[in-house]
Amino acid sequence: MNNSKWDDRTIAAASASLIILGALLYYWVGEVQSTVELLELAYGSLKFFNNPLVF
Amino acid sequence: MLSNFLSNYRSVAVLAFVVLTIALVEFFGVRASVYPSLLPFFEWLKYSSWIGYLGITYGSVYATIQAVHLISMALIGGTILVADLRLLGVLLKDIPSETITKGTHQCFKYSLSVAIATGIFCAAGVADKVYYMPVFWIKMLALFAGSCFIFFIKLPLLNSRPHNEVDPWMLRMLAVASISIWFTVAATGRWIGFS
């Protein structure tokens, strides 16, 4: 890879992209985790189709 | 030496400053201490401002402006998807990505302005509700970060040189980050509606 390609704007873009992707991953994984915990609290275990009439 | 670094790496220095500022704001609890003081503004927005009055009094006006808001958000999503999927090499491969980036950005700018203007009106009608919703603040944060990313990071790089001179993995990373953050704006926006 040509090092001259990694100038100021490229490094800023790479850093910002990584920060954004990391923050979004952290947020959405946290949301999935809390949803799973909520479903387990409600139904005892995680079911993909949580019909309260079917246990 | 520092001035030399700052002149050569201005964008990196600004980004590092912003990240450091956000970290300090969180560390010293500034956000948590400012949050309660925003409630009177949100209450004023709903009950005392003319946009709040219009929103809660005339359902048809609220629905019409919300429709414009949704259409402008759809346009934002469309322009983002077209530009970023072209950068990923998924669609419109026979058109130069420089042309698509410049063309879609014009539409993106106007759509974003309309979305923000109509979004303020929509939020005013339910201001006392959205104030307490974490997902509303996540949407505002994602919207702000996504706009800054487009205007200060993505476009300056893409407009500075032909795209074939940019590292292909850099282009892919830009496109994935852009799609992800605008997906979050859309998803959290709908989440507000279902909360």
Image (tube, coloured by chain):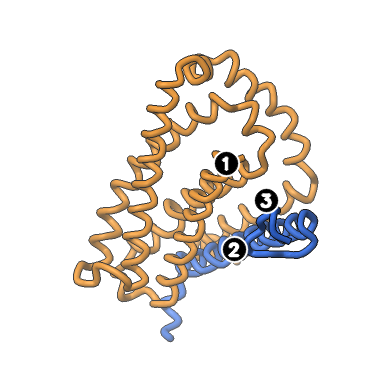
The N terminus of chain B lies in quadrant:
bottom right
For the residues marked 2 and 1, what is the alpha-carbon distance in whole angstroms?
A: 29 Å
Say which chain tag 3 marks.
Answer: B
Q: According to the colouring, which chain is blue? A: A
Residue type pointed to by label 1: Phe
Q: Is residue A35 above or below residue B74?
A: below
Identify the residue under disc 1: B194
Q: Residues within 10 Å of mark 3 (few under 14, many from 20)?
A: few
Q: Which mark is drawn over residue B136?
A: none
Q: Is residue B38 above or below residue B81?
A: above
Q: Earlier in the sequence, mark 1 or mark 3?
A: 3
Q: According to the colouring, which chain is orange? A: B
Q: Secondary structure at mark 2?
A: helix
Identify the residue under disc 3: B22
Identify the residue under disc 2: A19
Q: Secondary structure at mark 1?
A: loop
- Residue at the image point whose x is 37% and y is 56% from the top: B80
Say which chain tag 1 marks.
Answer: B
Q: Position of residue B174 (x, y in %)?
A: 45, 66
Image quadrant in which you'd find residue B2: bottom right
- Residue at the image point whose x is 80% and y is 46% from the top: B28
Image quadrant in which you'd find residue A4: bottom left
Residue type pointed to by label 3: Ile
Q: Position of residue B168 (x, y in %)?
A: 39, 77
